[in-house]
Amino acid sequence: YSNLAASLEDTITPPVKVQHTQLLINGKFVDSASGKTFPTLDPRTGEVIAQVSEGDVEDVNRAVVAARKAFDEGPWPRMTAYERSKILFRFADLIEKHNDEIAALETWDNGKPYEQSAKIEVPMLARVFRYYAGWADKIHGMTVPGDGSHHVQTLHEPIGVAGQIIPWNFPLLMLSWKLGPALACGNTVVLKTAEQTPLSALLVGRLLHEAGLPEGVVNIVSGFGPTAGAAIASHMDIDKVAFTGSTDVGKIILELASKSNLKAVTLELGGKSPFIVCEDADVDQAVELAHFALFFNQGQCCCAGSRTFVHERVYDEFVEKAKARAMNRVVGDPFKSGIEQGPQVDSEQFKKILKYIRHGVDSGATLQAGGDRLGSKGYYIQPTVFSDVKDDMLIAKDEIFGPVQTILKFKDLDEVIARANNSRYGLAAGVFTQNLDTANRLMRALRVGSVWINCFDVFDATIPFGGYKMSGIGREKGIYSLNNYLQVKAVVTAIKNPAW
Ligand code: NAD
């Protein structure tokens, strides 16, 4: 890796200026009530990009007052669904117009390759909002037979003020998966970004208002979890909270919701997803897909294929080739073209990943590639591969959330099903096989929210996503996500003379 490390020394100046650092409350950028700010850092260097207003309890209260008023008195839930839909379509157009600017902010704050932000994630952001813009005027209730002497109908109504707390690994996409359905259904929102990545959401928030969103409908509060985040989860005037992040914090959210007003809760939490390479696999293709499944986004994916189970017949060849592929992974300044991997998001994640790597070595797994930091500044980590990993090792059980592939050997399907399911998580799984029976068997047996067969990380806006077990509660994206933001009202009308 020595050449790569050397090339990390010259840091490229991002092609964007930071315009917005204040909180977005009631349609205006404002300072936090305390006047406090916090620095958001460039993961390439650890240097400060900008000082950002730090939202706390009082700011969440102000945002909730604005969102409440916009819901209880404002035009948003009262305008025609078609008008709401048009605003969301206009917003998607504006996202496309500002594609490169949004992408540059996302990369600067998060460290992910600019080409990934500009060519995949920002276009997906527009796609998700168009998908939900299309839903806005297609949400409706039913008529229900009842017992014959009543006319029964259901009204699908917005739930009210939604609190949304998002992580730093896909700041824009996580925002879209939450804002899209909430807005399509006519809710108003208080959204807290992750403290590591507050910048792109503020620009996107401005574009929402340029598209015609009424004031107070979306309020964006930058700030920390135990302060601003906890204030959202425990607020008495928030009707629903949606959270994406760690399982530990997910438990806190559920607790705060139950201790306050029993607001509805959806959670998208951690994972330790199996990627199963069957004996019939074309090894080259399997290596490439397993590599993508783990290393995509610096390994910072909740659904990362982080337990690579390989059948014993192809295991040795797979390990050799997985090692070679990791050694060839192009790591560097994410603003350079052709970069596959940038730095980890911050020093906390960086240190945590290096600690897990040491654990792997100490517990007897074979370090095939990587194993250390890359360069001397910023949070770059060498693409790392362990083989001979055993199920009870910490690196096979915990979510590492970094570029560390762990390869485990298996003998038969019954065994790999049991081992794959032996996890407190159940977010996703990958299956690599040409055998239809094997694919069908695994697809049914795996206790996870998404199974990708001969593919991985397919995130179309139409496909539901969420976890079994401790990976979460509820589904985002697709038609299923709408239920998270709707109340069902049953309206029963007596029929005077049912015998017509
Ligand atoms: P986290 O769960 O602490 O943070 C996610 C969000 O929750 C952030 O906005 C944060 O400010 C907020 N938060 C934190 N504590 C809170 C509290 N007490 N009340 C309300 N909100 C709170 O995640 P992290 O510390 O950024 O990362 C830790 C680990 O979480 C990672 O290593 C990874 O394993 C996992 N993670 C998972 C996802 C995912 O997509 N499921 C995303 C990011 C991190």
Image (tube, rainbow, N blue to C red):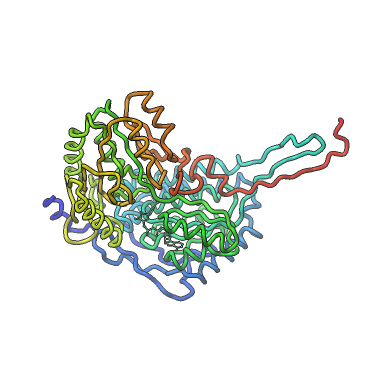
Place of residue 119 in the rendered image (x, y in percent of width and height, measured from the top left): 34, 44
Quadrant containing the C terminus in the rendered view: top right
Q: How many labels does the image show?
A: 0
Nearest the viewer among 82 and 320 is 320
Residue at the far left in the pictured view: 2
Place of residue 269 in the rendered image (x, y in percent of width and height, measured from the top left): 43, 51
Residue 15: in sight, yes or no? no
Q: Quadrant of residue 390?
A: top left
Residue at the (33%, 58%) spot, across then down: 109
Whether 125 is drawn above or below 441: the answer is: below
Q: In which quarter of the image is residue 14?
A: bottom left
Residue at the (37%, 35%) spot, across then down: 417
Residue at the (61%, 60%) spot, across then down: 70
Place of residue 207 in the rendered image (x, y in percent of width and height, measured from the top left): 47, 55
Residue at the (40%, 66%) spot, across then down: 21
Residue 201: in sight, yes or no? yes
Whether 87 is drawn above or below 141: the answer is: below
Nearest the viewer among 420 and 344 is 420
Place of residue 243 in the rendered image (x, y in percent of width and height, measured from the top left): 47, 54
Nearest the viewer among 484 and 358 is 358
Ligand 1 lies in quarter: bottom left
